Image (cartoon, helix red, strand yellow):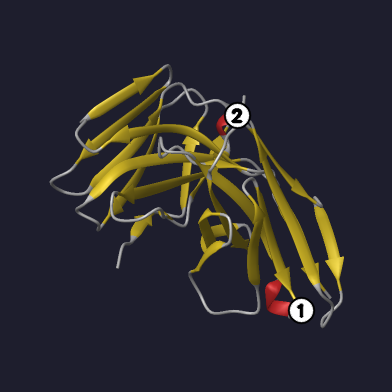
Amino acid sequence: GEDVEQSLFLSVREGDSSVINCTYTDSSSTYLYWYKQEPGAGLQLLTYIFSNMDMKQDQRLTVLLNKKDKHLSLRIADTQTGDSAIYFCAETSNRDDKIIFGKGTRLHILP
Amino acid sequence: SQTIHQWPATLVQPVGSPLSLECTVEGTSNPNLYWYRQAAGRGLQLLFYSVGIGQISSEVPQNLSASRPQDRQFILSSKKLLLSDSGFYLCAWTSGSYEQYFGPGTRLTVT
């Protein structure tokens, strides 16, 4: 079945760039997503990318997709304390209406 | 604009008691609706999803059930709660564009 894998933790110094990686198994994935979850809150959709795109940039966020390797990354430039959260990678396909989530990467910001 | 509501925000229930969590969406019609559970602040488990009134797909066998009595209302229920039902319950919706938006969540503690 479909699976989405992420590392569980990442520590980055304030002001540096954060790169959160994700791999997925479904070769028919159509959309790939990044969500942010702050403590005690629901998930906030940060950005998404169509499977026919290689890159998408939105202010401090850059999403890179390597479809051949089924690898997705989220780069956060100039990481700030407010970026501290859990980041979820997710994917969906045309086959059904489900979105499959990874377990989330907890981003910790060092002063 | 579209909004999604969940209530209650927090709930403490004894083992064996019934459960009813409600989710409503405003500003859209015929959305796909989803219930997720997040245990111990990590990972998202898809419990149920619905593509229309009265249409419920269950992802995992468990002590819970879902119903969709109206187009924009999704209810998660249990007749008898178990300790293992504790967690953070998230409702979400999508509408054609594959962007999935989440509610604020309900934290359920079963004692």
Q: How far across and down, in percent of the image, does residue A69 sit?
A: 16, 49
Question: Do we see residue A62 in this rendering?
Answer: yes
Q: Residue at x 69, y 45 (%)?
A: B24
Q: How far across and down, in percent of the image, does residue A94 sit?
A: 28, 49
Q: Could you classify mark 1 by the number of other residues whose Cα lies within 10 Å: few (under 14), some (14-19), or many (20 or more)?
A: few
Look at mark 2 in the image and give the residue it sits on. A81
Are marks 1 and 2 in one subunit? no
In which image quadrant can residue A41 be found? top right
Q: In the rendered view, tell whether residue B86 sits above or below residue B7.
A: below
Q: How far across and down, in percent of the image, does residue B58 sit?
A: 51, 70
Q: Could you classify mark 2 by the number of other residues whose Cα lies within 10 Å: few (under 14), some (14-19), or many (20 or more)?
A: some
Q: Nearer the viewer, residue A17 or B22?
A: B22
Q: In the rendered view, tell whether residue B100 sits above or below residue A1.
A: above
Task: Determine which of the numbered discs, if any, sits on residue B79 in the image.
Answer: 1
**Subunit of label 2:** A
Residue B72 as seen in the image, left or right of residue A104: right
Q: Residue at x 34, y 42 (%)?
A: A32
**Subunit of label 1:** B
| SS class, disc 2 | helix
**Residue type for callout 1:** Lys
Q: Residue at x 80, y 50 (%)?
A: B9
**Residue type for callout 2:** Thr
Residue A11 as seen in the image, left or right of residue B2: left
- Closest to the camera, between mark 1 and mark 2, is 1
| SS class, disc 1 | loop
Q: Nearer the viewer, residue A26 or A16?
A: A26
Q: In the rendered view, tell whether residue B59 sits above or below residue B68.
A: below
Locate the N terminus of chain B and report the quarter of the image it occupies. top right
Give the Cα separation between the discs numbered 1 and 2.
43 Å
